[in-house]
Image (tube, rainbow, N blue to C red):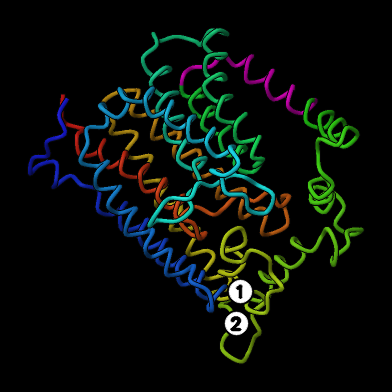
Amino acid sequence: MTSVIDKRQIRDFDWLTAFLAIAIVSFGVWQIYNAQPTQTYWSKQIFGLVIALIAMAVVAATDYRRLIDMAPIFYVIGLILLILVLIPGLGVKINGQRAWLQVPFIGRFQPSEFVKIPVVLMLARYFGNRKLGALKISELFVGIGILALPIALIMLEPDAGQALTYFPLLAVTLFLSAVKMRYVVLTIVATLVFVPVAYLIGVQTGLIKGYQRERIEVILDPENADPRGYGYHTFQSMITVGKGRLTGIKGDKGVSQSELKFLPEPHTDFIFAVTAENTGFVGCISLLLAYAILLSRLVVGAKQCPDRVGMLVIMAIVGGLAFQIFINVGMVLGFLPVIGVPLPLMSAGLSAVLSTFIAIGFVISVKMRRFVN
């Protein structure tokens, strides 16, 4: 395995995938500026894009099989970072969550975003190298164990929204690794039974905080929700989306909910609402179409991968991104509870942009070496 790139590999560089990702981030920078024009979030996002492009190029230039071989090292480093976050004085606490580390000259970064990548590599390395055939129950527990360690540390921050985004990584990997149908059915039934019971127990014991319960109740019973209280986030988001109509507010024809600070966290969790307000239905559909094309390009990369391990990595990445898009858009439109899941490539945040471009760099690395034995 070598990381040396020849002319044919440069020719096979997936420029369209890279362009789509850059275009979405650039569109996001515009919306971040619309959301917080007096802040520096938009300029920091541009800086993050530059760093992310460098990281993507480095990963693309590296043989993806070498990265998979180093998965255990990356995994251990990721767990160490998640532990460091929990140490007072090292971890930075914001809005009740100790989820960031302060890095000189760069600023805060969120390890839980980066750890998704070594988790995906570990899952693909284990399940991709196993013998063909239906998964054994012992193999399922190994996959659960790989996922459980980082999720447990993330829940201690606590960041339930970020922890939730890890589950699709395992689900996609298991689905593509010939998991037995009875395990799938058993999991679905157990989820349908366990979630309501766990919710009731969590409410009674206090494990589910009051604000978390209220955000769920907004979705279950919106007519009785207090629009000035616990329903504020959801109602303001829906109002912001509705104001955009077909093509968005124009000049003096509309007043921005985000600029007037009615919409909370407009540059991160609710950036899709800002997009709807400023570009309307047309802009939102265009953004979702760009996501669809980007994800389809990643799926093509999985089909072209010469081995199962690389294919599993790419498809887990696709599953994770698609899940985050679904959750964020559903949250903004009022179909799902507000749980703090950012919109990939759009929401402000160096960590999320950097980790996504590293994942895209892996896909490009596969495409550049699909003809190499």
Q: What amino acid type is highlighted by mark number 1? A: Glu
Q: Nearer the viewer, residue 302 or 72?
A: 72
Residue furthest to the bottom in view is: 252
Is 370 displayed left or right of 22 in the figure?
A: left
- Give the magenta range: 177-193
In the figure, residue 181 lies in which quadrant?
top right
User: Going from the N terminus, do you reach mark 1 or mark 2 first?
Assistant: 2
- Disc number placed over residue 249 in the picture, else none: 2
Q: Could you say where residue 361 lies in the image, as x and y percent from the top left?
A: 30, 44
Compared to 176, does 141 lie above or below? above
Q: Residue at x 80, y 25 (%)?
A: 193
Check disc 2 and report its element: helix, strand or loop: loop
Cβ–Cβ under 8 Å for marks 1 and 2: yes
Q: Is residue 52 above or below residue 139?
A: below
What is the secondary structure assignment of the residue under circle 1? helix
| Label number found at residue 289 | none
Q: Is residue 269 magenta?
A: no
- Quarter of the figure with residue 145: top right
The residue lying at 54 percent from left, 54 percent from top is 343
Location of the C terminus by quadrant is top left
Q: From the viewer's perspective, tell me whether residue 20 is left or right of residue 83.
A: left
Mark 2: few, some, or many residues within 10 Å (few <14, many ≥20)?
A: some
- Where does label 1 land, which residue? 277
The crowding category of the residue bearing disc 1, from other C-alpha atoms within 10 Å (few below 14, some 14 to 19, many at least 20), is many
Q: Residue shown at 54%/65% (left/top)?
A: 284
Q: Amino acid at mark 2?
A: Ile
Residue 30 location in percent, x, y?
46, 72
Q: Main secondary structure of the magenta part?
A: helix
